Amino acid sequence: MIPDIEVDRLRLDYGRSTVLHDLKFTLPGGRIYGLLGRTGAGKSSLLSLLAAFRRPTAGTVHIGGRPVFENRAVTRQVCLIREKADTVEGSDRVASALRFAAALRPHWDDDYARRLLRMFDVDPDKRIEQLARGQRAGLGAVLGLASRAPITIFDESYLGMDAATRMRFYDELLDDFMANPRTIIVSTHLIEEMSSLFEEVLIIDEGELIVHDETDGLLSRGTSVTGPEDVVDAFVDGMSVIGEKRLGRTKSAMIYGTLTEADLEKASAAGIELGPIGLQELVVHLTQRPGSFE
Ligand SMILES: Nc1ncnc2c1ncn2[C@@H]1O[C@H](COP(=O)(O)OP(=O)(O)OP(=O)(O)O)[C@@H](O)[C@H]1O
């Protein structure tokens, strides 16, 4: 049974500034979650609380009904891989990092780890500090995937990989998730290329959780409305407009919400073109500061 993660009134302050504001959500076990948001939104801070790397200022994180902070039995189930710090830095040899992970992780699969090292072109005899950035990112992928931790978290740890290696990582992540179901949380700015992995999406903006939804549900609420400017303006009047683009006298408005049958008929009668919005564009518009529309 893969444990649920329950976050309740979670707050984190760094000194006088609050970076996470009373977050409340539940992540049922056994899904792949995408954690998205602008730089500085609070994603890494949140992930460090989920993995008990930090103590919350207020509120709680429970995993499988048990508090995570200072609870070794729970934290052993959570593997957080970050681009920097702990796992993928230092003067140890790769092989000794693997031995350490094996001792720490109850579900560690050493044969799988060795296979992944070859896949990501990481030499086990090298010191971690001697690895190229992409190889260090590969080592992060190895440590995360082979941990088989019930809750495995990748915090932008694949940024150093080249495009071909990232694709291999995504394929491997999905294959291993299917074969060994667990909860995987991925924070990323590479939204477009990773969006097909996510079953649910969480969007953090300035420390607030502004969206938590199934990916399909979220995408179904974004629509681009294109046509002559005055016709588009009349159509979107009263709707939640999250972005606008103009090309000559043609205008495209991005709306967020569910269109009714009557809206669809109205659009068709007015000669307006309706289209989907990709996840990346949706996230960009939902997290755009007021006044920053073009
Ligand atoms: N150790 C720290 N001490 C003080 N402030 C911090 C610390 N770590 C992060 N912050 C601040 O907290 C806010 C959230 O940072 P965080 O790293 O969680 O954002 P993020 O969404 O992960 O950003 P990115 O996408 O760039 O990685 C930022 O304003 C950041 O400057």
Image (cartoon, grey):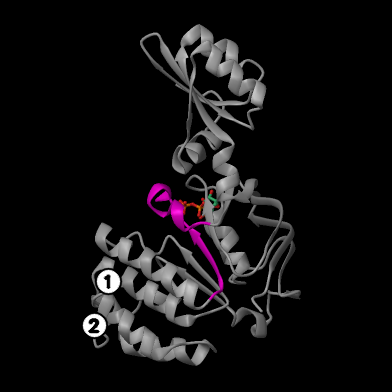
Q: With 102 as the anchor, is 264 left or right in this view? A: right
Task: Return the x and y of residue 36 as percentages of the image width and height.
Answer: 52, 50
Mark linked to residue 76? none
Magenta segment, which residues?
A: 181-198
Q: Tell me what residue is drawn at x 51 percent, y 78 percent.
A: 180
Asked if labels 2 and 1 touch by Cβ distance under 8 angstroms, the answer is yes
Question: Which is nearer the eye, 186 or 43?
Answer: 186
In magenta stretch: residue 84: no
Type of amino acid at the residue the image marks with label 1: Gln
Residue highlighted by disc 1: 135
Mark linked to residue 123? 2
- Quadrant position of the N terminus in the picture: bottom right
Asked which secondary structure carries label 1, the reply is helix
Query: In which quadrant of the rendered view does residue 130 lie?
Result: bottom left
Question: Which is nearer the eye, 92 or 262?
Answer: 262
Asked which secondary structure carries label 2, the reply is loop
Task: Return the x and y of residue 254 as percentages of the image width and height.
Answer: 51, 27
Q: Tell me what residue is drawn at x 23 percent, y 82 percent.
A: 123
Mark toward the start of the polypeptide (1 vs 2):
2
- Quadrant position of the C terminus in the picture: top left
Tell me, yes or no, if residue 204 can be seen here. no
